[in-house]
Amino acid sequence: MLARALRSSALSRAASRRFIGGFAADSAAPTVAEKVVNVVLVDYEGNRHVVRGRAGQTLRQACEMNQVGHIKDDSMGGGGTFDAVRADFYTESLFGEGSTSPQSHIVVSNEWVHKLPPANPQERHIINTFVPAEDRSANSRLGTEIVLQKELDGLVVAVPEAPPVETYEYVHEYDEDDYETYDEEEHHA
């Protein structure tokens, strides 16, 4: 009986080693470090921010994740059909997404502009129609359309201008009772 227990225990240890060894040897999944893409974002004041994103995220998503609020997006997912390339082997068709807002306008540095896929027609239209000519350049792109890939590690982009600051605050100054007692003759004098 003791021999049987020892044999059983030895078999389970061997099986365990094979499983663990096989698991480690067969695991080709990338590590987190292999998926991290660092982007240098130069804001409109000249400050540099290192934004860390994951491969497959858009530049705007990476900025949001890092709480760097210089790339905005107010589109609320209102674009048309859009294909997102998530990996070399996987393209996802998205509906109601895509570029619809110029608020994520950035300028890609000269050394990186040719390493990005070309802008799609919808992105070009948004830039050419809604980005002021003095802010637009041949390197203009939308941060919502740049999908980070490991090959883009070190990408340098600039935000060309500060977003407008909303200074007007609407104040509701009338009361329902005042509206009902409004006397036309009194106010036509």
Image (cartoon, rainbow, N blue to C red):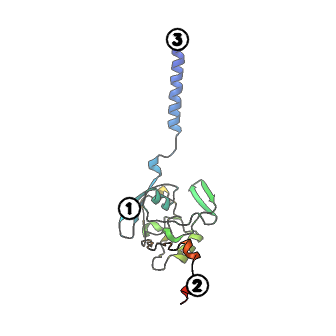
Pick whichever of labels 3 and 1 is earlier in the sequence.
3
Residue 86 in the image, given as x and y percentages of width and height: 56, 55
Position of the N terminus, as image quadrant, is top right
Image point (46%, 50%), residue name: 34
Above or below: residue 38 compared with residue 106: above
Q: Secondary structure at mark 3?
A: helix
**Residue labelled with disc 2:** 184
Above or below: residue 12 compared with residue 19: above
- Are the residues tagged 3 and 1 within 8 Å (C-beta)? no
Viewer-nearest residue: 182 or 23: 182
Residue 49 in the image, given as x and y percentages of width and height: 38, 61
Image point (57%, 64%), residue name: 76
Amino acid bearing label 1: His
Viewer-nearest residue: 180 or 157: 180
- Are the residues tagged 2 and 3 within 8 Å (C-beta)? no
Q: Nearer the viewer, mark 2 or mark 3?
A: 2
Q: Secondary structure at mark 2?
A: helix
- Are the residues tagged 2 and 1 within 8 Å (C-beta)? no
Above or below: residue 78 compared with residue 36: below
- Around disc 1, counting alpha carbons within 10 Å, would you say few (fewer than 14), some (14 to 19), or many (20 or more)? some
Mark 3–mark 1 Cα distance, whole angstroms, equals 66 Å
**Residue labelled with disc 1:** 49
**Residue labelled with disc 3:** 3
Amino acid bearing label 2: Glu
Q: Quadrant of residue 110?
A: bottom left
